[in-house]
């Protein structure tokens, strides 16, 4: 039996949309395309191949530290159990005081307690954990990476969503917008649990590269109400009885046209992520129009090389060429060209994220890659900017305007993911 449909098939807002330009497959002589540059998105399916049916609320594993760290301060508000490589090394019915965690060789140091192991786990007997200033539900896993470590929060998917909605949406926004995003965010998370998370130690991160998650500290009553009102509901795509979840991405503000998933993923297109819908409802977003933004070529080179080592083959950055755009003129693929004539091809959105992560001067104002890229001598100018984020799927500012106009959560989702169906996964 397939899970019970909770609504009729969503309203199909449009029959077709403009196709994004196909990525350039043939590279110019001398162009260097490094497999790792596109490995993260190579032929990734947008639709999960796994059956939707689940027996209960799944656990999600959220990586809390995008980079390995050397020290963390952990606390438990209740009794706790501390594990290392599968064995209990400390247990108490009393709350855990502030505990500083470090690595020393093959050992963990929990204040003065030294324990051998690669993996550790802090489990509250009742209540919450705190890492730094943030409270978390569920358990905290500590995974060694060299002489550093990463933190991964394991918790039930519904509680996770309460910590996401309150970070992704403004507190004053409509409960309808919260419910629409709860369904999209649940779908996005479940997709990663079933696909990209398999075979690695986490399913999603806690920042804009996946969904912003602020732990239990971020939860609000409005967020919890939306999570509970949509319990288990996900977006699916496919023939009746064969529906699968898909990567239901969303962004802050599309800037006027919803983007195709091909701007961020090299995947066979599906109707819900085809993009092309006109969405001027997001015009109240302060970043609906922006720019120009100037970023020094040296800063671009440094940040891109830090994210993609192949970029170092350029020696320095001479120019950026836009080599493929969508039907609505958004850059999809770029060539970074060095003074030595060599070039490295990158997805435009990947370059933006690399600039943000690398802290390139001015990149914080680079709200999207929905812009024109102009050479300005020692700098690159990003002009005619539109929107904030990748612009694929639900547009948060547009959804909020639609909610204010009386649209239901189902109608909003039907507009941004045409052809999708809402089903209960559990
Ligand atoms: Zn929009």
Image (cartoon, helix red, strand yellow):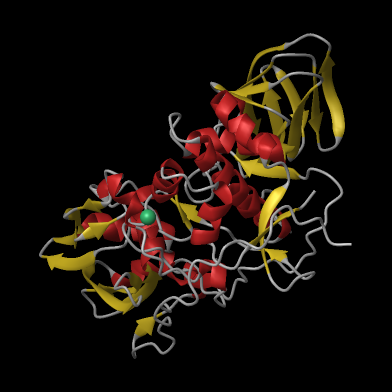
- Residue at x-position 79% and y-position 14%: 79
Q: Nearer the viewer, residue 266 or 402?
A: 402
Residue 262: percent from the left, percent from the top?
47, 72
Residue 339 versus residue 420 in the image, above or below = below
Q: Residue at x 16, y 67 (%)?
A: 374
**Quarter holding residue 173:** top left
Q: In this image, 98 relative to 155: left or right? A: left
Residue furthest to the front in view is 406
- Residue 410 lies, in percent from the top left, at 58, 52
Find residue 142 and report its horizontal and vertical position in percent. 68, 36
242 shown above or below 131: below
Ligand number 1: quarter of image: bottom left
Does residue 49 sit above or below 70 in this rendering? Answer: below
Number of numbered discs: 0
Whether residue 153 is visible to the viewer of this picture, yes or no, is no
Quadrant position of residue 21: bottom left
Q: Is 106 left, or right, of 286 in this rendering?
A: right
Q: Quadrant of the N terminus?
A: bottom right
Residue 241 in sight in this render: yes
The residue at the point 57 percent across, 24 percent down is 217
Q: Position of residue 268 (x, y in %)?
A: 57, 78
């Amino acid at each position: 039996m397939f899970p019970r449909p909770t609504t009729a098939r969503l309203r199909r807002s449009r029959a077709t949309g403009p196709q994004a330009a196909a990525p350039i497959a043939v590279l110019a002589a001398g162009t260097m395309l490094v497999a790792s540059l596109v490995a993260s998105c190579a032929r990734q399916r947008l639709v999960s191949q796994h059956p939707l049916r689940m027996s209960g609320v799944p656990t999600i594993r959220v990586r809390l530290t995008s980079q390995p760290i050397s020290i963390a301060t952990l606390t438990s508000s209740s009794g706790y159990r501390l594990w290392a490589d599968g064995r209990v090394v400390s247990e108490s019915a009393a709350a855990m005081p502030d505990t500083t965690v470090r690595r020393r060789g093959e050992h963990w140091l929990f204040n003065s307690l030294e324990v051998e192991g690669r993996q550790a786990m802090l489990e509250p007997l009742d209540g919450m954990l705190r890492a730094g200033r943030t409270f978390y539900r569920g358990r905290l896993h500590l995974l060694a990476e060299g002489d550093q470590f990463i933190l991964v929060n394991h918790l039930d998917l519904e509680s996770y969503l309460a910590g996401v909605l309150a970070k992704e949406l403004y507190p004053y926004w409509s409960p309808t917008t919260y419910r629409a995003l709860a369904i999209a965010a649940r779908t996005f998370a479940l997709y990663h649990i079933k696909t990209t998370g398999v075979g690695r130690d986490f399913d999603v991160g806690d920042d804009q590269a996946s969904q912003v998650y602020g732990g239990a500290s971020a939860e609000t009553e409005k967020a919890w109400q939306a999570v509970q009102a949509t319990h288990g509901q996900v977006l699916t795509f496919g023939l009746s009885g064969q529906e699968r979840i898909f990567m239901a991405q969303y962004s802050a503000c599309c800037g006027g046209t919803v983007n195709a998933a091909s701007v961020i993923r090299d995947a066979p297109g599906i109707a819900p992520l085809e993009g092309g819908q006109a969405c001027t409802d997001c015009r109240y977003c302060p970043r609906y129009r922006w720019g120009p933004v100037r970023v020094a070529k040296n800063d671009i080179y440094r940040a891109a090389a830090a994210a993609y080592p192949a970029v170092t083959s350029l020696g320095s950055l001479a120019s950026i060429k836009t080599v493929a755009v969508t039907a609505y003129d958004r850059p999809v693929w770029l060539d970074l060209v060095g003074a030595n004539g060599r070039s490295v091809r990158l997805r435009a959105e990947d370059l933006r994220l690399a600039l943000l992560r690398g802290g390139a001067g001015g990149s914080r104002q680079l709200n999207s890659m929905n812009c024109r890229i102009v050479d300005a001598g020692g700098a690159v100018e990003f002009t005619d900017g539109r929107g904030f984020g990748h612009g694929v799927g639900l547009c948060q500012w547009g959804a909020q305007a639609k909610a204010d106009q009386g649209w239901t959560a189902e109608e909003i989702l039907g507009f941004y993911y045409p052809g999708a169906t809402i089903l209960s996964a559990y």
